Image (cartoon, helix red, strand yellow):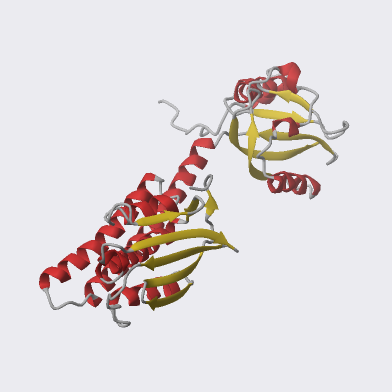
Amino acid sequence: MADETPGPSFKGDPPAAAKETVLPDRRELALVAVERTRMPMVVSDPRQPDTPIVLANHAFLELTGYTPDEVIGRNCRFLQGPETNPGDVDAIRQGLATNSDHFEVELLNYRKDGSAFWNQLSISPVRDEAGELIYYFGSQKDVTARRRAEELEAIERLLLKEVDHRAMNALAIVQSIVSLSRTDSIARYAASVRGRVEALARAHRLLAQSGWAGADLNQLMTAEMMDAPRGRVAAGGPSLRVPAPLVQPLALVVHELAANAVQHGALAVPAGVVKVRWAEEAGRILLEWQESGARNVKPPSESGFGLRILHGLIERQLGGKVKMSWDSEGLGAELRVPMKSAVRTGPGH
């Protein structure tokens, strides 16, 4: 009858595998494993001055593009470059100074050819049987693709937030236009609303052309004065880039001034002219609007929507100031708008 006594369950390699007669040099096997693994690795010696690299595997050389002779004997800092964050380097120093058993840092490193990559660096101390530090073991992982994906995701979130913010601002202006426009004629009401919405659309196109980086004030002024009688508007000033948040409100302001001149001011009579000048003054856009020749023309109502939207946009939305006067020659206006991030874009016109 066969022996049915169960044998010992399998729990790993036979004990003979650990005997020196079977495995005479474990260190040699460890070196082979380090050399052939796909994980970039280096070993540094803290007992030598400047803690040089004493071992670098093939994966590390492939990642960085260096040869063994260019790596062995050097401190790992040669992988740092112009955009490496000093704070990340300090985190490495702090980890080494506190004798941490293990720590990780992500930092921007550079290959031999100058290309940058994000390195997820893991460092662990190696100690002898007496507990003395003899080596630092460092592994690297190229996480550039992940970092770029995270950056793109963050940029996308910011872009969507900004688009939403700008869309809400534009819709708020449109809502004001629709709800506050007043006239005794449906046709004139539709025309006034359409003209103001078209001004916003023209400003939107200027922003789209610049990648929402702002718009040149001269281009904005030209776009809003294109329907004025030829030769009767003189406009000019230094080339200034208007920040994106100011472009649509400022376009509507210029539209209101031009529309008022055509309906009530200098451009309502054959001899009337308009002079427009702008400049940068102490971080603000200074816009001067001066009409002449508008004799016997009735000034607009102070409660009219055009003047109300002028004050509302400049003073409340843009934090600026409006100074207006009306005499026998026509309207004179002085507008001051904080430029914030506006910058000069070229020579004057």
How far across and down, in percent of the image, does residue 5 sit? Answer: 47, 33
**Residue 84 appears left or right of 312:** right
**Residue 80 appears left or right of 142:** right
Q: Residue furthest left?
A: 186
- Which sits in the foreground, 262 or 221? 262
Look at 30% across and 83% down and name the residue there.
303
| Camera sees residue 17 | no
How far across and down, in percent of the image, does residue 310 sit? Answer: 37, 72
**Residue 113 appears left or right of 262:** right
- Which sits in the foreground, 292 or 341? 292
**Residue 32 appears left or right of 304:** right
Figure quadrant of the N terminus: top left
How far across and down, in percent of the image, does residue 304 sit? Answer: 28, 79
- All told, the count of numbered labels is 0
Which quadrant holds residue 77? top right
Which quadrant holds residue 3? top left
- Which sits in the foreground, 128 or 346? 346
Look at 54% across and 52% down and name the residue there.
343
The answer to whether residue 7 is above or below residue 149 is above
The answer to whether residue 181 is above or below residue 51 is below
The answer to whether residue 87 is above or below residue 228 is above
